[in-house]
Image (cartoon, rainbow, N blue to C red):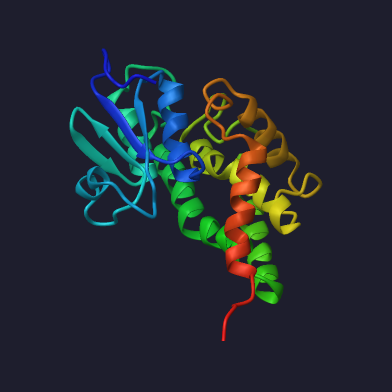
C-alpha cells in the first residue's frame, strides 16, 4: 500500500510472518489506513529500524508523519486514537469495559504468548508442559468470549486483534508440532471465533499464506530441535 495521503505519511517496519506485525496490519486495514510496509531483515536490521526503536531494536514500528511508535499493542491503541474518526472502533466507550479489554490484551502477551513459543521450541516434557499452559490460558479466553461473536462484541476489538494476530501462527504451530491447542470440543466458542475472524474483511487480506508460513516455521523449529553437530 502507498503510505502517503489524507492519513499522513504512514510506514510500517516489519516482516510478513511476524504475528506482532500482523496485529498492526489488521488494525490499519480495519481502519482503512494506507501505509507503506517496509520489510526488515531481522538478521541485518536497517538503520531506520535501529533509529526508530533504539531501546528494543525490534519490529513492528509504525512511523506516522516521521514519528515512530513501537510495540504492537501500543501501536494498535495509537491507531485507534490517531484515527478515532474512522470505523471500526477497537476500544469500548465505557471506561470499565476498556480496562477489561486492556487486561485481556495484556494477559495474551504476558501469559499466553510465552507458553505458545514454549510449544514451538520445546520437546518432550518441556513441550507438553507448554501445551498444558497454553490450553489453560485458552480456556480462560473461551470463558471471556462467552455470549459474544467477538471479544469486542459485535465487531472486532482490541482483544480480537491481540489474539487474532497470533491465530494463524497458533494454527501453524499446531501442524508443525503435531499439537492440539484450540480444541473444537473443549473450546467451541474460540473455534467459531477463529473461523469468523480469519474470514473477516480487513483480516483475510493481510494473513500470510498458510503453506509458506508452515515452511517458514518448520525451518525455524528444526534449528531448535536438531541435535548439535561437530566435535
Relative side of 55 to 165, left or right? left
Who's the residue at 41% across and 44% down the image?
102
Number of numbered markers: 0
Who's the residue at 32% across and 17% down the image?
85
In percent of width and height, residue 198 lies at 63, 30
User: Toward the viewer: 173 or 90?
Assistant: 173
> Given the current orientation, which residue lies at the most extreme right position?
185
In percent of width and height, residue 45 lies at 31, 50
Relative side of 166 to 97, left or right? right
Tell me the quarter of the picture where residue 211 sits: top right
Relative side of 14 to 155, left or right? left
Tell me the quarter of the picture where residue 77 sits: top left
**Residue 146 seen in this snapshot:** no
Tell me the quarter of the picture where residue 134 sits: bottom right
Who's the residue at 57% across and 81% down the image?
230
- Quadrant for the C terminus, please: bottom right
124 to 115, vertically: above or below: below
155 to 112, vertically: above or below: above
In percent of width and height, residue 81 lies at 29, 29
> Given the current orientation, which residue lies at the most extreme bottom position?
231
User: Toward the viewer: 15 or 87?
Assistant: 15
- Quadrant for the N terminus, please: top left
User: Toward the viewer: 155 or 94?
Assistant: 155
User: Toward the viewer: 203 or 17?
Assistant: 17
> Given the current orientation, which residue lies at the most extreme top position?
6
Amino acid at each position: 500500500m502507498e503510505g502517503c495521503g489524507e492519513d499522513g505519511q504512514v510506514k510500517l517496519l516489519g516482516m510478513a510472518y511476524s504475528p506482532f506485525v500482523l496485529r498492526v496490519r489488521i488494525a490499519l486495514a480495519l481502519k482503512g489506513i494506507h501505509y507503506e510496509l517496509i520489510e526488515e531483515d531481522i538478521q541485518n536490521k536497517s538503520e531506520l529500524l535501529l533509529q526508530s526503536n533504539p531501546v528494543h531494536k525490534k519490529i513492528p514500528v509504525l512511523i506516522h508523519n516521521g514519528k515512530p511508535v513501537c510495540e504492537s499493542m501500543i501501536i494498535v491503541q495509537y491507531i485507534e486514537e490517531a484515527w478515532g474518526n474512522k470505523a471500526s472502533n477497537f476500544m469500548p466507550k465505557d471506561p470499565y469495559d476498556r480496562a477489561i479489554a486492556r487486561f485481556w490484551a495484556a494477559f495474551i502477551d504476558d501469559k499466553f504468548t510465552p507458553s505458545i513459543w514454549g510449544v514451538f521450541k520445546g520437546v518432550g516434557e518441556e513441550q507438553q508442559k507448554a501445551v498444558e499452559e497454553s490450553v489453560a490460558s485458552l480456556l480462560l479466553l473461551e470463558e471471556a468470549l462467552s455470549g459474544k461473536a467477538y471479544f469486542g462484541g459485535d465487531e472486532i476489538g482490541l482483544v480480537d486483534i491481540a489474539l487474532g494476530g497470533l491465530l494463524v501462527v497458533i494454527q501453524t504451530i499446531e501442524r508443525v508440532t503435531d499439537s492440539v491447542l484450540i480444541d473444537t470440543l473443549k473450546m467451541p466458542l474460540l473455534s467459531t471465533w477463529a473461523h469468523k475472524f480469519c474470514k473477516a474483511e480487513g483480516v483475510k487480506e493481510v494473513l500470510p499464506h498458510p503453506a509458506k508460513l508452515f515452511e517458514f516455521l518448520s525451518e525455524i523449529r528444526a534449528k531448535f530441535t536438531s541435535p548439535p553437530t561437530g566435535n
